[in-house]
Image: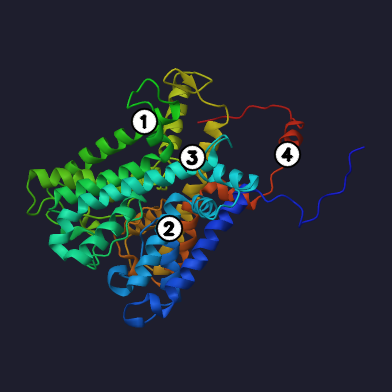
């Protein structure tokens, strides 16, 4: 006879989603404490508790929004802490925990492997430790290559010590889609808008980080052949290419004559490179080569759509993800054509894929709209609604672009952006699973109600 006694609270297994959500909170708390210390501030002066925790949240969530100029108001120690938080946020705290355990010669438990699998969006437990170490090595190699490509230009601009440190920090920040910089201009990388080499290197790092380690690994394994790629990789590559191409063309059309952005003293090549870079940075990167406040309202609205889509699963970026957008587009196409199943590239998608995608988009949409309305009330008409929407979408999608200047917001609005960034990094569905107890599938599937049709559309 099956016992009806429930296990005690202390013996119940902890859900992987809950562990992942708490893990990011722990990283934010530790980072916030460290960045609030006087040793982290320039000249030994603390940046403040709100600034410390806001910056830590933005770093762990690889967003890039900041209420301080980290290049001027953080010491070398504070900048190093920030860099570690960006790396932890971009690669995942479980990957770092695994690396530490392997370095110490400790065995990785089954629970840790399960957490690692879920944090990296994998389906199997087989070879998870080896896979995580491979991903970590891949990140170090790509970031190192980006640093070496930035050195020849940044050293002449800032000297050897700063040039090396700036190159390393910027390469990591770009690959992790974080958007933090140390240049101290307060305007991101707008002073480098006429440096095509730097912009293209950063764009390459951002795109690679946004593709996801699984896709990069699969491309290398298949020797860049399209035929052997999985459906996931094909959808990621097609959506990424379509978003980058369409974004570049639309930015050229919308900003070509805008003298405050592309229409100033830029030549045709610089306009093209900056349009491409703007299209790339909308994909959760946060670096700005042109002043976001001077973009046309059409470009800002376009940016909101691109930021909401964001990067790809198991990547360093945020957003609802490219595969989510792809599945929803395929769902619409299948409904229009009268098909019951969703298919692409000769493969059918799992039955619950569309439901999960709709859930993610709905939760994200509600959170963004609610936050936009609340910040609008808190700011009491100080900013245009399009700029507030741009800010909240940027926070949720962990992009880090701002058209109104995050430091200009009231403290209450800044505090509201922190949970929004956290939600965007952990993921709406993961956080919902972590907070809500779900009944067992068997129990749910045993109950059926009579069917009845309703009017749609």
Q: Are marks 4 and 2 in contact (CB under 8 Å)?
A: no
User: What is the C-alpha distance between the residues marked 1 and 2?
Assistant: 39 Å
The mark lying in front, picked from 3 and 4, is 3
Label 4 element class: loop
Work out which quarter of the rendered image holds the N terminus and state it: top right
How far separated are the C-alphas under marks 1 and 3?
15 Å
- 33 sits to left or right of 3: left
Give the percent coordinates (x, y) of residue 182: 27, 65
Quadrant of res 272: top left
- Residue positioned 56% across, 54% down in the render: 21
**What percent of the width, then of the height, locates residue 263?**
11, 51
Q: Position of residue 328 (x, y in %)?
A: 45, 32
Real-space CA distance between mark 1 and mark 4, rounded to the nearest whole angstrom: 37 Å
Is residue 131 depicted above or below 16 in this figure? above
Q: In terms of sequence position, does the residue under pointer 1 or pointer 3 come before the other? A: 3
Q: Residue at x 21, y 49 (%)?
A: 149
Q: Disc 2 and disc 3: Cα gap in Å?
A: 40 Å
Residue on which the image places disc 4: 440
Q: Which mark is residue 369?
A: none
Mark 1 vs mark 2, foreground winner is 1
- Looking at the rendered image, the disc whose residue lies closer to the viewer, 1 or 4, is 1
Towards the viewer: 149 or 291: 149
Q: Which mark is residue 131?
A: 3
Callout 1: SS = helix
């Amino acid at each position: 006879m099956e016992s009806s006694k429930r296990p005690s609270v202390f013996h119940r297994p902890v859900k992987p989603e809950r562990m992942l959500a708490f893990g990011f909170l722990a990283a934010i708390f530790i980072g916030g404490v460290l960045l609030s210390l006087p040793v982290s501030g320039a000249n030994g002066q603390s940046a403040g508790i709100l600034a410390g925790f806001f910056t830590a949240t933005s770093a762990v969530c690889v967003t890039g929004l900041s209420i301080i100029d980290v290049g001027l108001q953080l010491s070398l120690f504070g900048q190093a802490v920030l860099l570690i938080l960006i790396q932890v946020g971009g690669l995942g705290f479980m990957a770092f925990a695994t690396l530490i355990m392997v370095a110490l010669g400790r065995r990785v438990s089954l629970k840790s492997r399960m957490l690692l699998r879920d944090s990296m969006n994998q389906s199997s437990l087989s070879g998870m430790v080896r896979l995580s170490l491979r991903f970590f090595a891949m990140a170090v190699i790509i970031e190192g290559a980006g640093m070496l490509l930035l050195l020849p230009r940044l050293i002449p601009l800032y000297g050897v010590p700063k040039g090396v440190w700036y190159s390393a920090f910027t390469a990591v920040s770009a690959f992790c889609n974080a958007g933090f910089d140390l240049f101290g201009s307060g305007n991101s990388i707008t002073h480098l808008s006429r440096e095509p080499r730097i912009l293209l290197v950063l764009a390459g790092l951002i795109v690679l980080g946004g593709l996801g380690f699984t896709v990069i690994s699969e491309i290398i394994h298949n020797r860049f052949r399209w035929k052997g790629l999985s459906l996931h990789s094909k959808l990621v590559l097609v959506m990424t290419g379509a978003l980058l191409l369409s974004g570049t063309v639309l930015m050229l059309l919308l900003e070509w004559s805008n003298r405050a952005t592309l229409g100033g003293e830029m030549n045709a090549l610089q306009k093209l490179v900056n349009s491409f870079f703007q299209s790339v940075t909308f994909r959760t990167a946060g670096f700005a080569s042109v002043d976001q406040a001077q973009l046309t309202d059409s470009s800002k609205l376009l940016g909101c759509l691109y930021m909401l889509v964001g990067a790809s699963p198991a990547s360093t970026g945020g957003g609802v993800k490219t595969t989510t957008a792809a599945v929803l587009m395929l769902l619409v196409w299948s409904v229009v054509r009268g098909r019951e199943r969703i298919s692409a590239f000769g493969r059918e998608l799992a039955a619950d894929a569309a439901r999960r995608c709709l859930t993610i988009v709905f939760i994200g949409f509600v959170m963004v709209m609610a936050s936009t309305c609340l910040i609008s009330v808190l700011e009491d008409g100080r900013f245009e609604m399009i700029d507030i929407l741009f800010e909240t979408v940027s926070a949720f999608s962990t992009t880090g672009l701002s058209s109104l200047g995050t430091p200009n917001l009231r403290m209450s609005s800044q505090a509201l952006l922190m949970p929004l960034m956290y939600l965007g990094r952990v993921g709406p569905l993961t956080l919902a699973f972590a907070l809500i107890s779900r009944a067992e599938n068997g129990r749910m599937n045993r109950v059926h109600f009579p069917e009845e049709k309703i009017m749609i559309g």
